[in-house]
Image (cartoon, rainbow, N blue to C red):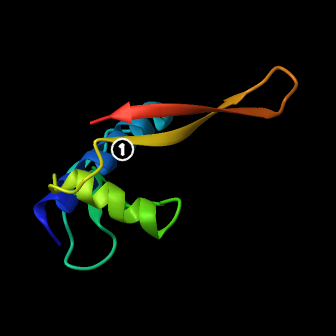
Amino acid sequence: MDDIQKRHEYAAGDAFVAWYNLQNRKRFVYDERPREAPDLNYIDGGDVLDVEITDAYYDKNDTEKQRKIAHQKADAPISMERHKFRRSISGGYQCSHVREKF
């Protein structure tokens, strides 16, 4: 595992645990990174919260684009088109295109 993936997992785990603590009035703090799954362990007194970080991509091409961007590869795209979904008043979803520049 490379440093970028580790930093991503720590950031995602810390954000999730901060939200979890607020929702559940807990005080979990980072404890360690186990050798095997799960990715991260947090503790609150004698309680342990195991966190496994999983990413999802649209398809194989999206996976490759995202990794190139994260690793700042020379052939990484400088912008990407994404879809932004918003819930409409009627209860359905509306999709708009968003162009992001990196």
Residue 6 in the image: above or below residue 89: below
Horizontal side of 34 relative to 93 (left or right) equals: left
Residue with the most extreme front position? 75
Q: Amino acid at mark 1?
A: Val
| Quadrant occupied by the N terminus | bottom left
Residue with the most extreme top position? 89
Residue shown at the point (26%, 79%) measured from the top left: 36
Please, what secondary structure does the residue beneath circle 1 have? helix
Residue 53 showing in the rendered view = yes
Residue shown at the point (51%, 65%) measured from the top left: 59
Q: Residues within 10 Å of mark 1 (few under 14, many from 20)?
A: many
The one nearer the camera, 2 or 67, is: 67
| Quadrant occupied by the C terminus | top left
The quadrant where residue 79 appears: top left
Residue with the most extreme left position? 3
Mark 1, residue position? 17
Residue with the most extreme bottom position? 36
Q: Position of residue 62 (x, y in %)?
A: 43, 59
The one nearer the camera, 101 or 9, is: 101
The one nearer the camera, 64 or 49, is: 64
Q: Position of residue 20 (x, y in %)?
A: 44, 40
Q: Position of residue 14 (x, y in %)?
A: 28, 44
Residue shown at the point (30%, 49%) measured from the top left: 77
Total labels drawn: 1
